[in-house]
Amino acid sequence: MTSEPLLPLLDTFGRQHTNLRISVTDRCNIRCFYCMPAENVPFMERKELLTYEEIERFVRIMIPLGVEKIRLTGGEPLVRRDLDRLVARIVALPGIRDVGLTTNGLLLGEQAEGLYRAGLRRLNVSLDALDPIKFREVTRRDGYEQVLAGLKAAERAGFREIKINAVSIRGMTEDEIVPFGHFARRTGHEVRFIEYMPLDAESAWEREKVLFASEIVERLSRELMPLVPLRGADPHAPATEYVFEDGVGRIGFIPSVSQPFCGSCNRFRITADGKVRNCLFSLEETDIRGLLRGTAADAEIVEAVRGSIARKWAGHHINAADFIQPKRPMYSIGG
Ligand code: SAM
Ligand code: SF4
């Protein structure tokens, strides 16, 4: 295939897809209740996972279609061996402008330096609570101190763009809101509150458990300091961003449930076992692994991805009566 630009990945609503999220594994070293089952997780077999060579080939094929932004995720991406090798390969691809990683941070202590050396600059670290007991309640594992140590290691390694992802859950993490506000101000890391979505493995999601972005803005503004919206943010970014009125401390929100951002969505995903998904909530997926492992030409892979994007819905149906939760939970899709 030439690297000449091809027609962009447009869906039937005119949305161009430039942002690819790649899951590298479904395994994880903790068990967040909103993502994984507590025990006996049915993990993929190793041979089912795309190799780094297969992932690199897929990204190469996507670049002429306009894909320029990559995020590596999982499961926990840092449990996959030598992730820095994959980062280096992707960073080196001409046309890729931006590579990020979403991690629970537990293994950053040992890997932050290697990842930075490989060319990674954007890091999202998931941490739902600053209270260690609450952390254990959410993750059903120990590791709070290790995450904080991982964050420090990332700072030492040179990472400047670190964002903290905190899923906000009513009846559980309300008391974390104000401490996270102080944390954002003290560390300079943007804290992004993510609304709890119906992608848990145990189908225990209830709308009543979603702590809405608007409530968090109100609480931080009242109990800490007024928040003002940040202007000039990327119109495709799912997060709405604020800064405290004295200019210190950024807070972001991913209000997937209360204010869906589907209209400007530019993302698609490939799971660790090589299925393209045009939406987190899609009920269908397109097998790419079979094509990568067979004799398919690059053009066939392009057509398979175009087909998937063409079938993308206008938006998720979380707020509709006909909502059906996808069979794959978050850890298996790649968040
Ligand atoms: N293990 C890594 C981590 O936790 O950052 C990467 C994968 S994880 C699936 C990606 C992100 O999805 C995390 O920030 C996690 O908190 C979020 N997430 C998982 N399940 C979720 C759910 N049901 N609702 C909202 N966010 C969720
Ligand atoms: Fe693991 Fe991330 Fe899922 Fe938590 S959210 S169980 S850290 S994959």
Image (tube, rainbow, N blue to C red):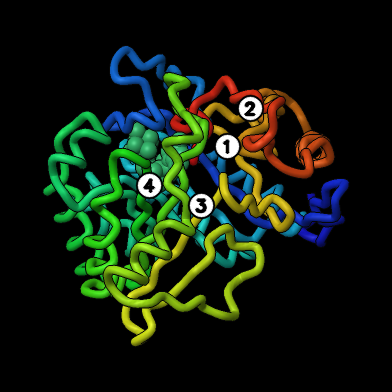
Query: Of callouts 1 and 4, which one flags the residue occurring earlier in the amino acid sequence?
Result: 1
Does the residue tagged 1 have its C-beta within 8 Å of any atom of ligand 1?
no
Of labels 1 and 3, the one closer to you: 3
What residue lies at 65% left-to-right and 63% top-to-bottom?
A: 236
Q: Position of residue 243 (x, y in %)?
A: 41, 77
Crowdedness near tag 1: few (<14), some (14–19) or many (≥20) residues, C-alpha within 10 Å: some
Residue linked to disc 2 = 289
Q: Amino acid at mark 2?
A: Arg
Establish if 110 lies above or below 121. Answer: above
> Which label's residue is closer to the chain start, 4 or 2?
4
C-alpha separation, residue under disc 1 versus residue under disc 4: 35 Å
User: Is disc 3 in contact with disc 4, using a CB cutoff of under 8 Å?
Assistant: no
**Image-quadrant location for residue 223:** bottom left
Task: Examine the rendering and report whether any part of residue 262 can be seen.
Answer: yes
Residue 56: x, y in percent?
Answer: 57, 46
Sequence-first disc among 1 and 3:
1
Looking at the rendered structure, the kind of residue marked 3 is Arg
Q: CA distance from mark 3 to mark 2?
A: 19 Å
Q: Nearer the viewer, mark 4 or mark 2?
A: 4
Whether residue 120 can be seen here: no
For numbered disc 1, what is the local secondary structure?
helix
- Residue 150 position (above or below residue 283): below
- List the residue tagged with mark 4: 168
- The structure residue drawn at horizontal position 66% and vertical position 27%, both measured from the top left corner, is 323
Mark linked to residue 54: 1
Please report contact status of discs 1 and 4: CB closer than 8 Å, yes or no: no
Q: How many marks?
A: 4
Provide the residue designation for mark 3: 71
